[in-house]
Image (cartoon, coloured by chain):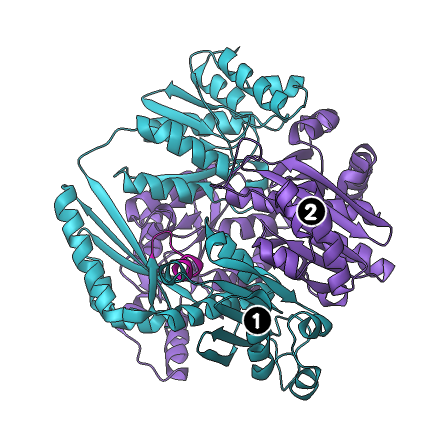
Chain colours: A cyan, B purple
Amino acid sequence: MAIGDELLTGQCIETNSAYLAERLGELGITVLAHWTIGDDPGDIADALGRAAQAAELVFVSGGLGPTPDDLTRQALAQAMGCPLALDEASLAHIEAFFRHRGRRVTETNRMQAMRPADAEAIANTMGTAPGISARLAKATVYCMPGVPHEMKAMFQQGIEPRLPRGDAVALRRVVHTFGMGESDIGTTLADLMRNEGDVRVGTTAKAGVISVRIVVRGAGRESAQATLDELQATVTERLGRIIFGQDDETLASAVGQLLTKRGQTLATAESCTGGLVGQLITAVGGSSTYYLGGVVAYANQAKCDILGVPAELLEKHGAVSERVAMAMASGCRQRLGSDWAVAVTGVAGPTGGTTAKPVGLVFKAVAGPDGASAGGYQFPGDREIVRLRAAHSVLNDLRLALL
Amino acid sequence: MAIGDELLTGQCIETNSAYLAERLGELGITVLAHWTIGDDPGDIADALGRAAQAAELVFVSGGLGPTPDDLTRQALAQAMGCPLALDEASLAHIEAFFRHRGRRVTETNRMQAMRPADAEAIANTMGTAPGISARLAKATVYCMPGVPHEMKAMFQQGIEPRLPRGDAVALRRVVHTFGMGESDIGTTLADLMRNEGDVRVGTTAKAGVISVRIVVRGAGRESAQATLDELQATVTERLGRIIFGQDDETLASAVGQLLTKRGQTLATAESCTGGLVGQLITAVGGSSTYYLGGVVAYANQAKCDILGVPAELLEKHGAVSERVAMAMASGCRQRLGSDWAVAVTGVAGPTGGTTAKPVGLVFKAVAGPDGASAGGYQFPGDREIVRLRAAHSVLNDLRLALL
């Protein structure tokens, strides 16, 4: 159950329920429904009561913040028919959190240390709002903050260890690919995607990355694991080199592993992606061992001055061209002193497109110890999607060059 | 109400409800809750029955596709207590759709032309699955496809024109701030956030950006608009300079507007953010008029070679220091020939922290025509959050310098 007017009115997309459902599925706990409720204490209390009738476990996110529109703790106390009480340990944690940042605790922050008298607080290691664990009807209710990273940390550290674990398991593996369309992958894996019995195989597409999801449910962990491994082996055999990783791995982390194995370094030269390629690479912890840095050469002057792209190349072919992409990659490799460099230049839109060079046209290049190669591609989608596809695509070019 | 196992199990994020809630809010229709239900005909029929008791209008998306796990039409017929019947017009549409693409209509596609006998079909201009409109208890139920662009087109073309339009409207404004904690804003606006009558004021926090949401419902557009404007004026007066924009505006777009007004240019020098600041700036369409580019100086060598940071400064103070941040900003401004430059250097984590320089410690600098200034901050959160907060924070420093 997610609480918040910003969710109910559609101002924000609700993502906590999907995260929780995924984790609960892995623990073999069946999810019956997700509900989103506004910041109304009566509505929240009603929903809590109904959920506690329908399920054994109720997970709530949101409405624990310090402002007057944070009403989950009051609503839970109302549903439980008990008053709110101050949780001393939570108050001490909140006071320490603010002291550490040199700020004063206000009366509204103290409110966060309140919980229904018959409930327990759950520690928040990422912020001030403690969670709440309580019995309601025949259910156990867990209330968590709405901020996703606080909710995730609290679930993993404070709630997951307390959950009942049945014999039934649901094992899940996601295999990520780049370079083949979703319908072609669907055709290649059609016999596996029939979804009979305890096995589910499906695909999801995001900015050119097609992920194949394999879920196996079963009474025993060993036989479920064997089925999962066998399915994954079949998928791997059929899709081959387009597979770049599994589960939490990304194109950037796959490239990082290959560079680490070779003991080589990387630099980036970006125009239309504006820093996105560097951001994806450095989103991987420990990327400083192989990533030296990069240049965002948005203006043509920067392409010449810092990357050494010849001005006549820009004049003759334009900034969005294979030749300039190649010169950017080679210049970047030289300038940063790296073993490898990638470059992207294109028309991200929504404006700036021409008949010859329409929105979505992107040139990418990879420069390495044995020379450079480049290519162009016409990406569909809006500015955000074109940029992300272009970034994924050049990282995949580099991955294939490193294989 | 969203239908689908892929939503219930958390494989996909559910976005249709947010879209519908936003459109309905604009029409003055109050949304009571969002529910997500799996591909189980009994669960769907139960939920439809309960929703039709609680509300006058029920909007359903998903479960109208051609595969055996698409069960919304059967569940609706079950809830209505009537059989399914073939809709001739829908069948003709489906046949034409396939003929147009040179494909044969299969038996499963014919299933999509079925609807409860006492219901009406709604045309789908973007795909094969027609929608359904039906009476259930005292409610009108509208079923739409789950694919977002088909759902949106059907809502706009086939459903919105049929909806009752009261005089009631709901107007919304979101005011974005940076630089004050959510609880302090809560204290400052406490009297406005009591949420009585037709006015709702609330806050949402994301990576240091605190957004104040004002929603006014009312019988007349004019008086609601007057109330909204008055509330926004009060919020603006109380929060002052920490407000950087409203609705779709971002810190990057606010900075862009200020630079455009001054006719000045910007460059970026990034270490721990790895390109994120550049990416945020270039996510704004038209940013090429003021953004020249930047340097991602991840390795110390790149800080010296490209940005001209003196090696002795790095040795004496370390890469994560106020002095180095300042030298990065000044060097970047010079190197790119821009009017302004911002720099970020810090420890994003999860590794690399020390007692003296813990994870989350970030130094930021702004260099401009009148010199440079820098400062440090200790950010909470994981790698992703530290990086986003640091990027937001330096953009806000620049905004304040430009004001």
Magenta range: A246-256
What residue lies at 58% left-to-right and 46% top-to-bottom?
B387
Under tag 2, what secondary structure? helix
Q: Which label number is shown at residue A334?
A: 1
Q: Is residue B259 magenta?
A: no
What residue lies at 40% left-to-right and 32% top-to-bottom?
A155
Q: How many marks?
A: 2
Return the residue nearer the eye: B35 or A398.
A398
Return the residue nearer the eye: B350 or B241.
B350
Return the residue nearer the eye: A10 or B323.
B323
The spot of residue A39 in percent (x, y) is: 57, 31
Question: Height in image: B214 above or below B246?
Answer: above
Residue B196, can we see it? no
What residue lies at 20% left-to-right and 62% top-to-bottom?
A233
Q: Is residue A203 rendered to the left or right of residue B188?
A: left
Q: Residue beneath label 2, please?
A: B325
Q: Is residue A252 magenta?
A: yes
Question: Height in image: B260 above or below A300?
Answer: above
